[in-house]
Amino acid sequence: MIPLLAIDIGNSTIGFCIFQNPKKNKKMFIKRISTHPALSAKIYKEIIAEIIGQRTKSKDFDTIISSVVPSINVPIVEAVKDICRKKPILVNHKIDCGLTFDVKTPEKIGADRIANAIAGFYYYKRPVAVVDMGTATTITIVSIKKPCKHPVFLGGAIMPGINLMHRSLHTWTAKLPHAPIKTPNAVLGKDTTSSINSGIINGTAGAIEALIKGVEKELGFRLKLILTGGYAKLVSPLIKKGHSMVPNLTFEGLRLIYLYMSGTALCT
Ligand SMILES: Nc1ncnc2c1ncn2[C@@H]1O[C@H](COP(=O)(O)OP(=O)(O)OP(=O)(O)O)[C@@H](O)[C@H]1O
Ligand SMILES: CC(C)(CO)[C@@H](O)C(=O)NCCC(=O)O
Ligand SMILES: [K+]
């Protein structure tokens, strides 16, 4: 198989990841750049060409993109097409990746959540709750449809991410500092900084546990909990429910969707 370039366009950062052999999950995380300000197709082309040039032997590669920032798609797609003369795959609810949707508006679901759903499901092959802690903290619930055992996107929850909470407290108050975020060692804050850390990190951990518990109660079955996203490390020690931490799960989802679309069976 030719190398795969997976691009994750989020509201804070754009991540580029190269899989030399998409059949193996040995990923090479290459580069993350800020989403803002948007750059021209010419500059994205330079960035991508440099990554490709450094990391792959051949000029031939495929590209799969998850984007939750539509305005960035045009210059990135143009840049990719300019380099490899092939259209990238853009993840959306219509692509054929074995996932069905049991939600009211599947067309509105973020592509990153579709990738997370696929990765979470094929990693554990049981009903999962994927928690992704980026700009937003998202919870994505996937169950299994019998008899063919394919994954079903059941819905989830969306709340402000750690950095968004942190920045908005500082921006919209007169007295709250922009103190460093770290895992708090107590719930009871003893100064402003530790109170903010407790509120945001303990608050996020508690919110996640409460949301998962509520969803499990509504569904009537248990969920395997998976944490991903850059902030997962901060929150994981405070979550009592058993869970797995999988860094870069969204990229894994993109790799698995690509494999599915190129006819490779993802066994269930
Ligand atoms: N490997 C890492 N180790 C330590 N911290 C990380 C790592 N990757 C990301 N982070 C930190 O975690 C934050 C969240 O990263 P993540 O990639 O999950 O989301 P994001 O890029 O901020 O948001 P979005 O994907 O919505 O644009 C980053 O801003 C960064 O500060
Ligand atoms: C929630 C975010 C911003 C997380 O990146 C993204 O998945 C998104 O824009 N989603 C659209 C709404 C939805 O997923 O229901
Ligand atoms: K993300």
Image (cartoon, rainbow, N blue to C red):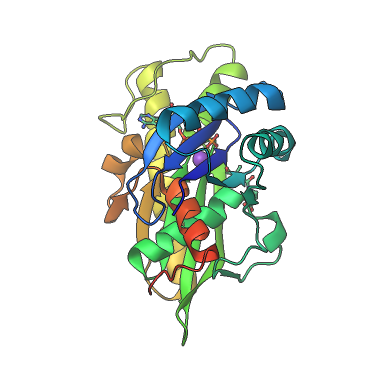
Where's residue 94, x and y in %? 67, 64
Q: Does residue 260 appear in this view?
A: yes
Residue at the farthest front position: 58
Task: Report whether 133 appears left or right of 108.
Answer: left
Q: Nearer the viewer, residue 26 or 244?
A: 26
Q: Where 174 falls versus 226 (above or below)?
A: above
Quadrant housing residue 123: bottom left
Q: Nearer the viewer, residue 227 or 168?
A: 227
Residue at the farthest bottom position: 147
Q: Where 50 falls versus 238 (above or below)?
A: above
Where's residue 59, x and y in %? 52, 38
Residue beneath the point at 61% across and 40% down:
84
Where's residue 215, x and y in %? 47, 64
Q: Where 34 falls versus 83 (above or below)?
A: above
Residue beneath the point at 34% across and 48% down:
246
Task: Report whether 78 appears left or right of 231.
Answer: right
Where's residue 72, x and y in %? 69, 34
Q: Nearer the viewer, residue 28 or 54?
A: 54
Quadrant housing residue 73: top right
